[in-house]
Amino acid sequence: MKAEGRSPAGDLLDDLAEQVSVAAMEAFGVSKDAANALGTDVAMRMVEQWGGQQLYMPKGARIEASRMHQQIYEDWKGQNHRELARKYGFSLQFIYRVIKVLRKADLDSRQRDMFSPVGHD
């Protein structure tokens, strides 16, 4: 329930700080004090970056799609394209395209650039 006189923007910043705090405790096991400090810091950085502007908060479809694409790639066993198409409700062509793009990105991330200087480990 919204407190009298509170703005939706203030509620948004409070919720952002809280969500970051909870995520930090869950994902990294940081103390409540450290998590709260991080949440407040992130909220203040958003104020500095976006303060005074009207914002539209998307529902995160792009992030959700990226997660689903990653899950498809992780479930891929080399020859199970049809199974993945059925499981995720996509066309076979779409599954092939997702795997092709993510496989290339995966291979590119593992391959060294032959023109980069060799570092000393």
Image (cartoon, rainbow, N blue to C red):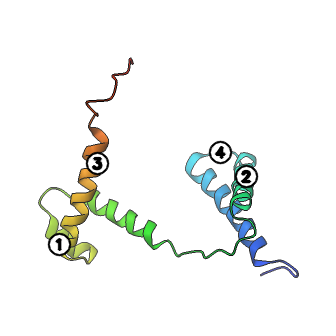
Q: Position of residue 59 (x, y in %)?
A: 52, 76
Q: Residues within 10 Å of mark 2 (few under 14, many from 20)?
A: some
The picture quadrant where one finds residue 68 is bottom left
Judge the density around disc 3: few (<14), some (14-19), many (≥20) Cα neighbours within 10 Å: few
Viewer-closest of 35 and 47: 47
Q: What residue does disc 3 label?
A: 106
Q: Residue at x 38, y 17 (%)?
A: 120
Q: Position of residue 94 (x, y in %)?
A: 22, 71
Query: What is the residue that sits farthest to the left in this orientation?
Result: 79
The residue carrying mark 1 is 93
Front disc: 4 or 2: 2
Cα gap from disc 3 to disc 4, whole angstroms: 31 Å
| Nearer-the-camera pick, 50 or 93 | 50
Residue at the far top: name it. 120
Q: Amino acid at mark 1?
A: Gln
Who's the residue at 31% across and 43% down the image?
109
Q: Quadrant of the C terminus?
A: top left
> If you read the primary sequence from the N terminus, does the residue marked by circle 3 or circle 2 appear first?
2
Q: CA distance from mark 3 to mark 1?
A: 20 Å
- Residue 41 shows which numbered tag? 2
Give residue 30's mark. Answer: 4
